[in-house]
Amino acid sequence: MGRLLLALVTILIGSAGTNGLTNYLDCGIDAAMRRTNHRALPSKRIYPPEKVLPLNIGLVIIGLVLAWFLHPLCFIAGLVGTIAAVVWRKRAICVFPQGMIASCAPVLIGWFAINPSFSWELVLLCILIAFWLPLHVWSVMIAHREDYINAGLTFFPMSRETGEAVNVLLVFSLVLGVAAITLYFIGGFALLYLIVASLLTILMIYATSRLVISSASQDAWRLYRLSAFPYLGLIFLTMCLDIWLL
């Protein structure tokens, strides 16, 4: 239990520091968008923005030190995730591949802290995160398409017509569903997980299909809200409950 608690603290501190650094790097873009210009840095509630750097860099360093204490593989996952999120950004199509690498880092840290070995279950967990992320990020971009374009962001999905971009999301939702349900068989979960994962997958595919048909911003926003919570949150919560009940 103590090791699990330390892993949670490590992930919390490291993620907070990295998220703070990305907010600092995106401060100019956030200021140009109606959706984000109220945040602490673009609204100048914290000014100048450089004031956040000592705290955020300190949190990242503390997180990496704790990750090393847990296991060298935890440290590697944390370091690579931080580099992908902070250094290697805006150099590729949005969320590919740097966002996926950064998003998988917390899962890898938690896994290696308890079980420092690779398995198919871990691969499926990373696939789950990797294919969830575009659905989550691109749906909010489609919902606020003009806001992003006016801020000068022209990568995918803004680089394509909405009707074309949403077709990609349907493919991702199908792969996401396959990964979530396959985890039931590979991970040895009980029936509770299979029921919840199946219901959530049906909801996700329905929401994405509705967006494909309408291409409406309100349907993109509904998909974004579904992807954030309940989908991913309930998937992981059910995994924990399933293991606890077993």
Image: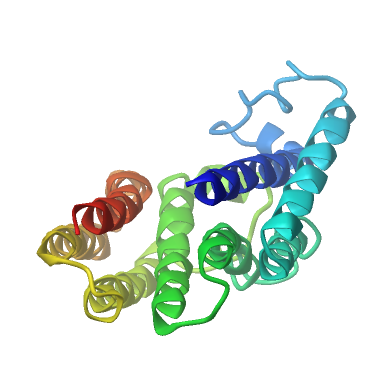
Q: Position of residue 146 (x, y in %)?
A: 52, 46
Task: Name the foreground residue: 57 vs 71.
Answer: 71
Looking at the image, is 96 positioned above or below residue 120? above
Type of colouring? rainbow
Task: Name the foreground residue: 118 vs 234.
Answer: 118
At a point 73% along the width and 56% down the height, the residue shown is 69
Q: Is 32 placed left or right of 130 in the picture?
A: right
Q: Is 130 placed left or right of 92 in the picture?
A: left
> Which of the 4 quarters of the picture holds residue 183?
bottom left
Seen as rendered, the residue at the extreme top is: 45
Q: Position of residue 166 (x, y in %)?
A: 36, 66
Looking at the image, is 22 positioned above or below residue 112? above
Q: Position of residue 24 (x, y in %)?
A: 77, 38
Task: Name the foreground residue: 32 vs 63.
Answer: 63
> Which of the 4 quarters of the picture holds residue 77?
bottom right
At a point 53% along the width and 58% down the height, the residue shown is 110
Q: Position of residue 99 (x, y in %)?
A: 61, 63
At a point 79% along the width and 51% down the height, the residue shown is 65
The quarter in which the C terminus is drawn is: bottom left
At a point 45% along the width and 65% down the height, the residue shown is 129
Task: Name the foreground residue: 66 vs 237.
Answer: 66
**Mark count:** 0
Q: Is 54 placed left or right of 90 in the picture?
A: right
